[in-house]
Amino acid sequence: MTATTDAAAQETRLQRLLVVLGIVVLAFNLRPAASSVGPLLEEIRAGVPLGATEAGILTTLPVICFALVGGAAPRLASWLGVHRVVLLGLVLLTGCLWARGHVHQGSLFLVLSFVALAGAAAANVLMPSLVKLHFPDRVGQITAVYTTSMAVGLTASSALSVPIATGGGEHADYTRGLVAWAVTAGIAVLPWVGLIRHDLHVDRRTSTIGVSAIARTRLGWAMAGAFGLQSLQAYAIFGWFAQMCRDAGYSAEASGVLLGVVTGASIPLSLLIPILAGRFRDQRWLLTALIACYPVGYLGFLADPRPLGWLWALAIGCGTSTFPLVLTMIGLRARTPEGTAALSGFTQSAGYLLSAAGPFGVGALHAATGSWTPSVLLLLGLCVPLYLCGLYATGDRYVEDELARRT
């Protein structure tokens, strides 16, 4: 029995419930810092103010931040303890989300957004390791819980940011729409104050499996490719889909609701997909079903955005549910918590670096052509390499085995 399994076995039922609560509230707050921006982008640009270049940077900032911070998070956790790093990330997220809602300088708004996203990024990368640490025999079930909570937070921030900002009136105050998610992040801090004591009992010696070692495996690159290309799709959609709907003739509130449909479609799927993935040794059939939804949504939106926008949004939302599948694969493609942490660090750091061009590129292509059609067709074409990387990543293999064959 490993030290991690021993630690998990010694936890009382109440302690394990506190861990689950901490994971749930943490997951809920990992996306609103980014997804609340899209529906309010026009109001933010006018109120801060932000130029076209700064707006493009803002929509790209989440993936840049996750790429830069993701690789460092496992090493930082080995020094300070994984629970302490998560708590620190939540504190940064809360404070900076609150502060950025009250500034009116473009560069400061971007800096505060970056630091808030850095806090979320560190916690995001460590999630699979936390699951493996506390629930080594229930990776699929607990991943289902936290990906569902993540989807709920994503949907709530996408659909409710505009109504919160308007407060029932006609004019939107973007400050209210942004600061609301600082409040939920502050609530999430509370259980993690009690969870940092776990770091006193967990072996925090530096793992023999480093992030750099994962870069020497095919599985590591396949996982990074699948994660990165899926994140490229997701963040381009989060950043620009509401604006696409507004340009197609929908109101600001209706556009936010349609983005909520995209994100809301992932709620039941985020609960179902990790459970299904955990029950099978080969998940390629599941990947195929999800990827097939992208062409339906993209081509349908191009052909007839109104009045069937909700249908195309639903299909795109099903496609973005490739995300919980790839997250589940991080836990299933490694045999140990150390391997999981290293695989998560490399997958998310390299993956987000790959995806960084997505939101900025989609916006730049639209600005250059004056149409959303080239951008949507680009996203459609990128589904092909996403599928190919996913096919390898969802096969029955483990990163430790690939490392052993290399040595």
Image (spheres, rainbow, N blue to C red):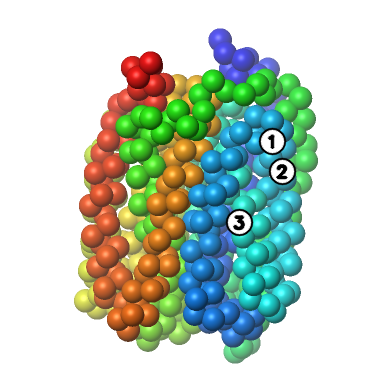
Q: Dot 3 corresponds to which residue?
A: 117
The answer to whether mark 1 and mark 2 are in CB contact below 8 A is: yes
Labels 3 and 1: the sequence-earlier one? 1
95 with respect to 114 (left or right): right
Q: Dot 1 corresponds to which residue?
A: 83
User: Label 2 crowding class (10 Å Cα cut-off): few <14, some 14-19, many 20+?
Assistant: many
Using the image, determine if residue 51 lies above or below residue 296: below
Please, what is the three-letter code of the amino acid marked with disc 2?
Leu
Disc 2 secondary structure class: helix
What x and y, as percent, mark residue 66? Answer: 53, 51
Q: Dot 2 corresponds to which residue?
A: 87
Disc 1 secondary structure class: helix
Using the image, determine if residue 2 lies above or below residue 89: above
237 with respect to 39 (left or right): left
The Cα–Cα distance between marks 3 and 1, rounded to whole angstroms, is 18 Å
What x and y, as percent, mark residue 174? Answer: 63, 78
Q: Nearer the viewer, residue 347 or 331?
A: 347
Q: Nearer the viewer, residue 38 or 106?
A: 106
